[in-house]
Image (tube, rainbow, N blue to C red):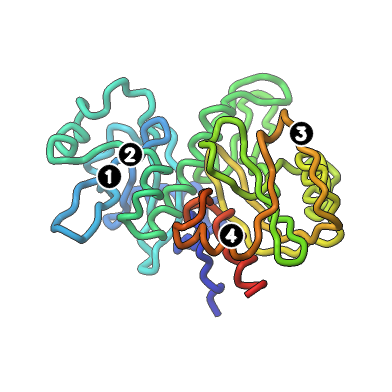
Amino acid sequence: MPLTQRLNMFANNPLDRAGHLRTDEAWLASQIAANDALFVPLWRGDTLVLPEAAAGQGRDVAWLPKAAISAFLNNDVIFLGLNRNNAPRFAVDISLLEAPEQTAPFDALCRAGGVFENLRTLAMVGDMPATELAILAQGKGLLEWHATHGFCSKCGAKSVIAEGGYKRTCISCEADHFPRTDPVVIMLPYLGDKCLLGRQAGWPENLFSALAGFMEPGETIEEAVARETMEEAGVAISSVHYHSTQPWPFPSSLMIGCLAEAENETISVDEKELAEARWFSVTEIKNAFNGTAEFDIPPSLAIAHHLIKAFVEMKG
């Protein structure tokens, strides 16, 4: 039985990552050479996107055949997985190019309306399938890890990509290094019919969102939620309830969404973390969703949006 689909952006990746097969170098080579293999170029985290074939159809990811991308297959190549027809999909890093829009084969595609687009922008615009965005998030996250982990943290020697992009191996001491994902708790504290939202200093004055912070070593999700809420807003938490997670490839986080029941409404803001924190009633939050409130909440791109929505649904 397939997993229940989540509304969180960058979730619901449809590819089979074939972890049991990608350790086989011969198998990987055969997949790269396969006639139905397709490759998406990523330039400094941006994806090549093609214009709409017809009005209203939405833009398309530029999935290219091997013949078009062959000049770049000595770059970092990430095996993304197999689609439902067992056709392999890859991401290729072309970040060394200074002007990809002037380099074949991308120049012709750009002249025809293609553009290298930021993933966050693509998600905000919402004119392509969420499953495609999830695949792009996978490729972006892995390629950015490789871009910053080219040397062994054990001996300092150069490391090389292995297992289709899911490992780096040191050429000197042979130590293995694996892509990191940084866990972040993002929580919506609530008490009665009110929830607590905060605003960071660099945000628009009327934008409020859920609280968030990185987990620390030796810490449970519940402990991290309680600690971060206390540190940022001075609010004590009595219980924590898991909601959902969201891959967040900016650059490599996993957002762990929770609802957190507070003990009281007293707020003491840490001004290094937040510019402001306020309690909002269910009615005020409903008004924010229908656009009649004097404050804004994050768009559906963000897991915070769905945490706030879950609070409204819980309280009626």
Circle 2 sits on which residue? 117
Q: Which residue is found at the position 80% from the left and 53% from the top?
A: 265
Circle 3 sits on which residue? 270
Query: Mark 3 Cα within 10 Å, few/some/many (few <14, many 20+)?
Result: some
In front: label 1 or label 3: 3
Q: Nearer the viewer, residue 307 or 102?
A: 307
Circle 1 sits on which residue? 49
In front: label 4 or label 1: 4
Q: Is residue 90 left or right of residue 70?
A: right
Q: Amino acid at mark 4?
A: Glu
Is residue 9 shown to the viewer in this render? yes
Q: Is residue 148 above or below residue 288?
A: above
Query: Percent x, y for residue 151?
Result: 61, 23
Q: Amino acid at mark 3?
A: Asp
Query: Percent x, y for residue 81?
Result: 45, 56
Query: Image quarter for residue 129?
Result: bottom left
Circle 4 sits on which residue? 284
Q: Earlier in the sequence, mark 4 or mark 2?
A: 2
Q: Separation of disc 4 and disc 1 at Cα?
A: 39 Å
Q: Is residue 130 left or right of residue 227?
A: left
In front: label 2 or label 3: 3
Q: Separation of disc 4 and disc 3 at Cα?
A: 24 Å
Q: Quadrant of the C terminus?
A: bottom right
Query: Mark 2 Cα within 10 Å, few/some/many (few <14, many 20+)?
Result: some
Query: Image quarter for residue 263?
Result: bottom right
Q: Are marks 1 and 2 in contact (CB under 8 Å)?
A: yes
